[in-house]
Amino acid sequence: MNHYDALKLLALRAVMKPDAEAQYRSICRWYSKTFHTPLHAVDELPEEDVLTAYFEDRYEDMEEAEREDALKSLLESKEDRKARQRAKDAEDAEAFEFAQRLAAEERQKQAQKKVADVQVEKKPSMLSAASQRESRLPQEGKPAAFEKLEPDVSIKFMDASEFEKELEGFGMMSPKEGK
């Protein structure tokens, strides 16, 4: 491996999994950009001055509630920090399990819907036209709509082709002129 590829790998590792030195180099680059100081000059400044400027800048940009959280986090003991982290991990695990259950339920609903859709798609058996007409008519007694008809009115059911034949003698069905 050549020298440049080795440096690229070290830089990539420092970005992906930064150690303390990589974090400090990042802060030095921030300082150089922010205060227009050459990077080699930042290396000569006291570390405390560079870090103080960095953290002050970060805390200035935070909302008041975020600063309060940062203060609490900095003042808590190691035991409190571990307990808080365990509680957060447990909460995250519970949220993950809940999401898994919801996803499983949704998959089950989708599967049931697909089964129902397949059952709906099945075609009913073909009935003859006469039996279809009869199935739509009321079986017992006259419906209220038929009772209101004049006594000389009759209703006749027919196929579309028969209906076309009956209409042939009437000509065009359009509104009368002059109305």
Image (tube, rainbow, N blue to C red):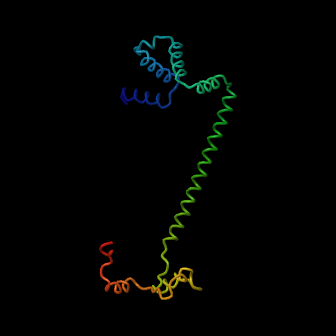
- Residue 8 x/y as whole percent: 40, 29
For image coordinates 66% across by 22% down, the residue present is: 75
For image coordinates 48% across by 88% down, the residue present is: 152
Q: How many marks?
A: 0
For image coordinates 63% across by 23% down, the residue present is: 71
Residue lying at the far front of the rendered structure: 178
- Residue 33 x/y as whole percent: 42, 19
**Above or below, 75 relative to 132:** above
Residue 38 as seen in the image, left or right of residue 72: left
Location of the C terminus (image quadrant): bottom left
Residue 88 as seen in the image, left or right of residue 127: right
For image coordinates 48% across by 71% down, the residue present is: 121
Write down the quadrant of residue 108 in the picture: bottom right
- Residue 158 x/y as whole percent: 42, 86
**Above or below, 1 relative to 139:** above
Residue 8 as seen in the image, left or right of residue 133: left
